Image: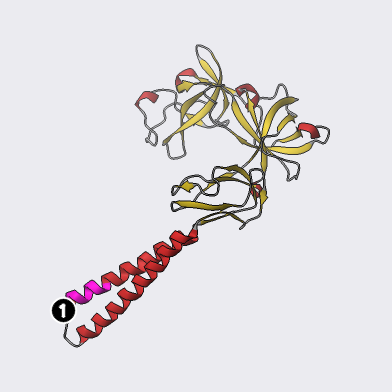
Amino acid sequence: MLTAAGTVRLRRETALGFTTSGQVASVRYEEGDRVKRGALLAALDSSTVAADLNAARAERDRAEAEYARMEKLYKDGWVTKSRLEQAEAAARAARSSVESAGFANRTALIHAPSNGILLSRNIDAGQIVAAGETALVLGEIDKGFVLRVPMTDSDASRLRVGMPAVVRIGSSARDPMRAVVSEKDGRADQQTGTFEVSFRLPASDRLRSGQLGSVEVEVSRNASDSFAVPANAIFGIRAGEGLVYVVDGKNRVKQRNVQIGKLNDKSLEILAGLSEGEIIVTRGIEKLRDGDLIKPIRVAR
């Protein structure tokens, strides 16, 4: 039995902001509030953008009227074609300005893109914000929750995506939840050297981002899908991982990240990243580049 502790997180978190600068008029929700798809979360003061839109519409109407007048005069021979083209260009520019001002007016409001929980609120009414600045962070409930668990490379290598698990969350530890391994990091954390494993949790109203939990996974103590490859087949080794060149069916090499275990003078244990029967390059790797075509003369399994 493999046991470990981790933290509950929403699987997807989305940063939201305004596409134009301005003064915040209102913010409807607080951190931790649940919102429904389409709910109005925040709004800019619309007086400036509304004025810009009205001005753009007025200029469009004037430019189009001028173009219509120039078109009639051109047909009667009173103006040159160059003058007509200038009026036409001015009308097109004015229509584009209306579209731009209309977009700014529409996006002066932030609506929830999905059902979710407001994880972060970085703005308040009266605050001046810049275009593109992160105003709110929404955790998307529709994508579900996961328990993120840091594990050593030896423990992470014993798990496979889809394996069942039992999770217990904080004060509800006596009421376990069924979960499955959903994701495994391919790179170790540079500070801790651990790999983060995610366990997908079932929908539940008692789940909150940041809760602590524990997981139990039934694995065979002796079972291992690891195997050894020649030590000179590995390059770029660091923090429990390395790189190999895998040969595809067309004899082209593809660079592959692998998790590594014990090393001796002749071989290196591969914990994850390769499958039984795949062909890797064991000599001349220093001369290769990703995608190179080769003629295999010897294979390692």
Residue at point 57%, 32% (across, down): 185
**Crowd tier of the residue under label 1, counting other residues whose Cα lies within 10 Å: few below 14, some 14–19, many 20 or above:** few
Residue reaching furthest right? 174
Indicate the position of residue 204 as horizontal and vertical percent values: 75, 44
Viewed as shown, does residue 131 lie left or right of 27? left
Residue reaching furthest front? 126
Residue at point 44%, 60% (across, down): 49
Indicate the position of residue 238 as horizontal and vertical percent values: 48, 21
Find residue 119 and report its image quarter: top right
| Residue type, mark 1 in image | Thr
Residue reaching furthest top? 265
On the image, numbered disc 1 is attached to which residue? 80
Indicate the position of residue 88 as horizontal and vertical percent values: 27, 74
Q: Please check the rendered image and state whether residue 177 is part of the magenta-colored stretch, yes or no.
A: no
Indicate the position of residue 58 as horizontal and vertical percent values: 37, 72
Residue span colored magenta: 82-88
Please name whichever residue, 120 or 7, is drawn nearer the observer in this view of the structure.
Answer: 120
Please, what is the dominant secondary structure of the magenta stretch? helix
